[in-house]
Image (tube, grey):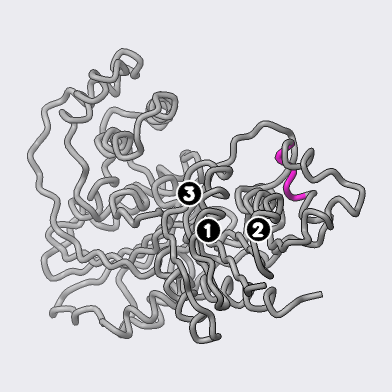
Amino acid sequence: MTTPLTDTALDLFHTAIARADPAAAVAQQLARAPLAPLPTGGRRIVIAVGKAAVPMMRAALSQLPQPPAVALAITNPENLTELAGAQVIAGAHPVPDASSAAAGQQVLDSLADLRAEDQVLMLISGGGSALMVAPAPGVTLADKAAVNEILLASGLEINRMNLVRQALSRLKGGGICRAAAPARVTALILSDVIGDDLRAIASGPTVSPLGDRKAAAALLQTEGLWDKLPVSVQQALSAPEQQQDTPTADNILIGSNRFSLDAMAERARALGWEVASVVDDLTGDVADAAQRILDTTEAAASAHPQALLFGGETTVRLAGTGRGGRNQELALRIAEAADQIDGDWLFLSGGTDGRDGPTEAAGGIVTPQTWADIAATGADPKALLSNNDSNAALKAAGALVTIGGTGTNVADVQIFLRRPA
């Protein structure tokens, strides 16, 4: 049975997802700011890459005044589908393989020999860095995979890892712009990265790199990683580097976690709620995130109906063998702390892609009664939480949020609604 609080929370959750709809975001951007007309003899190349490549391409084709010379969409195998007017191919995700390399080469071939009167429209969404790859000359996919394992084990901060990855790629770190020069490049970007650093979204194919090969080599040597690298990688990073500036693209962010949070806030106010807080950096361990939410709700308590909104992407320390995901575990942790929260309240945590971990759920929705409801079924909620079995716990209480795949991904959102006692 739903309640008014449940209805409101689900309304806000779907508002967040709708704001991140890839097709709508592309269509609205191109309607608001159409691409410059092509000069006489000019060609338009449209390349979409990422998990949302197909709907983004479909929307772009519907808005362009004439069919492009090339329309290529590269997506993950699960989203592979035919699209009239475009070629759709699949790369591999999250680990690139030969199909990703073939996709990367096809992109480079499509951008070869462009002229100043030509235009390139890039449609970029999450997952792009694995779906199309083009290793530096002399470096194989196996070599790059070995480097990636070394970087992940090193504990380096993400942008320092990306410095190395970009130095070993012909596409990452502005590679699209260099390959397309002197043609003009416009990129419409759907961000799956908290903070919206364009260098991190799909590894920044239309953004200047974080540094050059020399800087990457120096970092690896300083961190004691150089001797662990394949010889081919050492040679590639030591080779003389031809100075080549990265042409500036017109990079336009058309969707992100923050955009979805703002849309939820606007909708909550329209429904009569006081938006007491909007937090756009809920990251780190899920237990710490739960405490931050509790602290925020306590500090914001008032005599008015309140909506507190959060966005980000947390992590879970796996200590058990259960099934769940970061959103379900976060919801279960808030349910466990029910006695610390005053008033009539509800909390929802969900992934905007409609999937949370290896489960059918997008997340969980809990109230002051949820923890007791789980126990009333004969289950032990604390034992389930300790076993990372949040899915079973929330399912027992009928507290899962299940909406199916949404076709987009701007990380996670959380909604806390409270009416004073």
Q: Secondary structure at mark 1?
A: strand
Up-down relation of residue 332 to residue 259 (above or below): above
Q: Please state which of the two labelled residues, at mark 3 or mark 2, is closer to the viewer.
A: 2
Are the residues flagged by discs 2 and 1 in contact, CB closer than 8 Å? yes
Q: Label 2, label 1: how many angstroms apart (C-alpha)?
A: 9 Å
Find out whether the residues at labels 3 and 2 contact each other: C-beta distance under 8 Å: no
57 with respect to 334 (left or right): left
- Where residue 356 appears, as percent x and y from the top left, is 63, 53
Residue located at (10% from left, 44% from top) = 244
Q: Label 3 neighbourhood size at 10 Å, few (<14), some (14-19), many (20+)? A: many
Residue 118: x, y in percent?
A: 18, 69
Is 390 covered by the magenta stretch? yes
Q: Residue at x 34, y 35 (%)?
A: 157
Q: Which residue is mark 2?
A: 363
Seen in the picture, residue 202 relative to 86 is either above or below; the reply is above
Label 3 is placed on what type of residue? Gly
Q: Within 10 angstroms of label 1, few (less than 14), some, or many (20 or more) residues?
A: many
Q: Mark 2 falls on what kind of element?
A: strand
* Amino acid type shown at disc 1: Asp
Q: Quadrant of the C terminus?
A: bottom right
Residue at (61%, 53%) from the top-left corner? 327
Name the kind of residue labelled 2 in the image. Gly
Q: Quadrant of residue 420?
A: bottom right
Examine the structure image and report whether residue 184 is included in the region drawn in magenta. Answer: no
**Is 233 left, or right, of 362 in this rendering?**
left
On residue 91, which mark appears?
A: 3
Residue farthest along the top direction in this orientation? 227
Q: Quadrant of residue 7?
A: bottom right
Tell me the distance, in whole angstroms, between the alpha carbons under discs 3 and 2: 28 Å
Q: Which residue is mark 1?
A: 412
